[in-house]
């Protein structure tokens, strides 16, 4: 078994494996996400009984981000996502070996290796605990009814599409900074933040809804990013 950083020539094969485990993404999407990856490739005489000799049998995308640890202090980090191992080879330690390999080759490019848990509680998530990750914090979401898209006194709540959301980015960033700018622990936000978010596989693959609360003069007073069902197959709406 050979675990190493993804090469350009391996991208199509790696994305094909990812697409067999998770929602497929294409090469253009991959390049938009500012990623590298770690792959596990079998040796020419390995797993021949499974028809997988000299094949990519494991793949972990690694997305580069800038993390604000406190106001004014930003560190480069890498987020793992979508750890995938061929279904016939799971339980052989391939996933853990890929994480160990990634931690070695990205150490001169990032200060920490992360995974976002969100509301997930699955065997796939528990894999990270077994491979040496530690919980630092828990994101909080609010569960409630679908937002009413109608005027409420001097405030109007409206649902908009992603293009309109990106067009409002300066006011969205200013509102976020006014509420949370004095805290650390989040991804650095600046020009291009929301376009980057929407190009990531999490927001691209799911039915997220975007709401703005505006005053009668059009000034932004609040916003919500809402998803139906969170990580579980339920009907609640979760607000982020």
Image: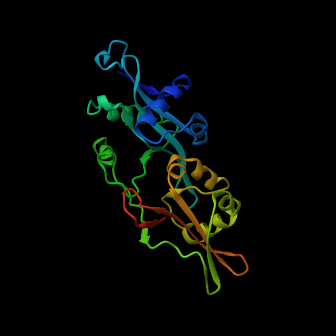
Q: Position of residue 204 (x, y in %)?
A: 54, 49
Instruction: Examine the rendered structure and indicate whether residue 107 appears above or below residue 164.
Output: above
**Identity of the residue furthest to the top in this view:** 45
The quadrant of the picture occupied by the N terminus is top left
Q: Is residue 105 visible?
A: no
Choose between 185 and 140: the one closer to the eye. 140
Instruction: Examine the rendered structure and indicate whether residue 99 appears above or below residue 137.
Output: above
Q: Which of the 4 image quarters holds residue 8?
A: top right
Q: Position of residue 230 (x, y in %)?
A: 41, 59
Q: Position of residue 39 (x, y in %)?
A: 43, 29
What residue appears at the point 49 percent right and 28 percent down from the top-left corner? Answer: 6
Q: Which of the 4 image quarters holds residue 120?
A: bottom left
What residue appears at the point 50 percent right and 61 percent down from the top-left corner? Answer: 184
**Identity of the residue furthest to the bottom in this view:** 153
Instruction: Examine the rendered structure and indicate whether residue 2 appears above or below residue 23.
Output: above
Choose between 131 and 15: the one closer to the eye. 15
Horizontally, is 133 left or right of 198 in the view?
left
Choose between 187 and 239: the one closer to the eye. 239
What residue appears at the point 49 percent right and 71 percent down from the top-left corner? Answer: 146
Instruction: Examine the rendered structure and indicate whether residue 208 appears above or below residue 215.
Output: above
Q: Position of residue 218 (x, y in %)?
A: 71, 76
What residue appears at the point 65 percent right and 61 percent down from the top-left corner? Answer: 165
């Amino acid at each position: 078994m050979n675990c190493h950083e993804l090469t350009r020539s391996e991208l199509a094969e790696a994305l094909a494996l990812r697409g067999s485990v998770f929602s497929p993404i294409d090469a253009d999407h991959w390049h938009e996400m500012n990623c590298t990856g770690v792959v596990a490739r079998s040796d020419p005489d390995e797993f021949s009984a499974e028809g997988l000799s000299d094949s990519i049998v494991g793949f972990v995308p690694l997305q580069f981000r800038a993390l604000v640890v406190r106001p004014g202090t930003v560190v480069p980090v890498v987020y793992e996502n979508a750890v995938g191992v061929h279904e016939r080879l799971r339980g052989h330690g391939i996933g853990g070996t890929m994480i160990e390999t990634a931690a070695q080759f990205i150490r001169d490019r990032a200060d920490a290796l992360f995974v976002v848990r969100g509301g997930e509680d699955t065997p796939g998530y528990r894999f990270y605990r077994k491979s040496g990750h530690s919980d630092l914090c828990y994101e909080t979401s609010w569960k409630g009814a679908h937002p009413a898209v109608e005027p409420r006194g001097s405030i109007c709540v409206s649902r908009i599409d992603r293009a309109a959301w990106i067009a409002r980015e300066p006011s969205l960033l200013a509102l976020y900074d006014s509420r949370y700018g004095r805290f650390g622990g989040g991804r650095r936000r600046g020009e291009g933040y929301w376009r980057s978010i929407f190009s990531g596989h999490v927001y691209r693959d799911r039915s997220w809804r975007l709401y703005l609360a505006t005053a009668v003069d059009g000034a932004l007073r609040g916003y919500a990013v809402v998803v139906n069902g969170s990580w579980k197959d339920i009907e609640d709406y979760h607000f982020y």
